Image: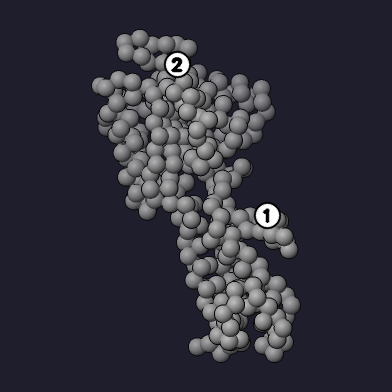
Amino acid sequence: MRLDFNYIIVDDDLKRSNRQRRVKELENRINQKIISKGLNPKPKLYKSLEDFYQDESNLDVNRYDLYLSDNNLGNSGNTIQQEHANDGIELYLALHSKFLCDFILYTGSTQDVIIDRLIHHLKDKKDPGLFTRFTFVSRSSDRNVDWRGSILNVIDYIISSREEMNTMRGFYAQLTSQIHTYLKKEFNNELDFSPAIGCLNRKKFNYGFTKADIDKLHKIRKIRNGLMHQDERKCGTKPHTYYLVYYEGRDNMVEKRIYLEDFDTIRKELRDMYEKICTAFNVL
């Protein structure tokens, strides 16, 4: 179970001491949100696209939960470098072409150029997934407008998916541990989960079990192993969505995915098996 929440901010306000406060305030609010959810914030900040690209080879990009960038990265002191005025949207398109990433773009300038760039990319690349993990936030200069709150809402959505998965891990760990304990007690051994199921299999008819029940128990065991030992992974088709993995097959090479919408079915199958074991073994 991964407890770190890794994210990156690219903002040229970091170049100037009198503007750094704006970025630091955003970083602090993101960190507070992440901590409130029981996770550990792990930010990395870059003041330009060049700095990010210089460090990119050192990053495990698939471990970053979120990328954030100002669109206009061309402010340098009192001058504006027009060639970097839309670096933020170019960064998203560059990352999107390489791997899946959740990306928040914010800007205080006009949105027309950003919209035109996205439309051009969509027509050119015919990319239906262009907007699935992309969020645009207008950065207001009005102190009464909480534009950072929109960013926190996206983070809430991302983390809520991971929270449900961690809850599922806990539920699965508890019930499968109890099932394993009941099997060991019933057959008076200290076997691992798989051979303990094998003991039940050899006497399944005495307990009212079928081959299908034994197969379900092994599936439950494999799901448990996946939940306990595999980190959640990003979905390529659903926005801000993760899935969990377990493996089937004798060589444990057949990958199976579990999405949030599968959780009710998975929980019911485990609960039903737990109750069947308790009934068969006269567990009160």
Q: Residues within 10 Å of mark 1 (few under 14, many from 20)?
A: few
Query: Along the line of sight, which residue is nearer the eye, 16 or 107?
Result: 16
Q: Which residue is mark 2?
A: 85
Tell me the kind of residue under disc 2.
Ala
Is 218 left or right of 141, judged from the image as shown? right
Query: Badge 2 local density, few (<14 within 10 Å), some, or many (20+)?
Result: some
**Residue placed most toward the observer, 282 or 120:** 282
Mark drawn on residue 127: none
- Which circle, 2 or 1, is nearer the viewer? 1
- Residue located 59% across and 59% down the image: 226
- Residue at the image position 47 percent from the left and 58 percent from the top: 166
Please tell me whether residue 174 is drawn above or below residue 86 in the rendered image.
below
Res. 223 image quadrant: bottom right
Q: Nearer the viewer, residue 260 or 3?
A: 3
Residue 103 appears in view: no
Res 17 seen here: yes
Residue indicated by mark 1: 255
Which badge, 2 or 1, comes first in the chain's sequence? Answer: 2
Q: Residue at x 37, y 28 (%)?
A: 139
Residue 153 on image: x %, y %: 41, 43
Q: CA distance from mark 2 to mark 1?
A: 44 Å
Relative side of 208 to 191, left or right: right
Secondary structure of residue under mark 2:
loop
SS for tag 1? strand
- What type is the residue that disc 1 sits on? Glu
Residue 4, placed above or below residue 73: below
Quarter assignment of residue 217: bottom right
Q: Residue furthest front?
A: 190
The residue at the point 69 percent across, 59 percent down is 252
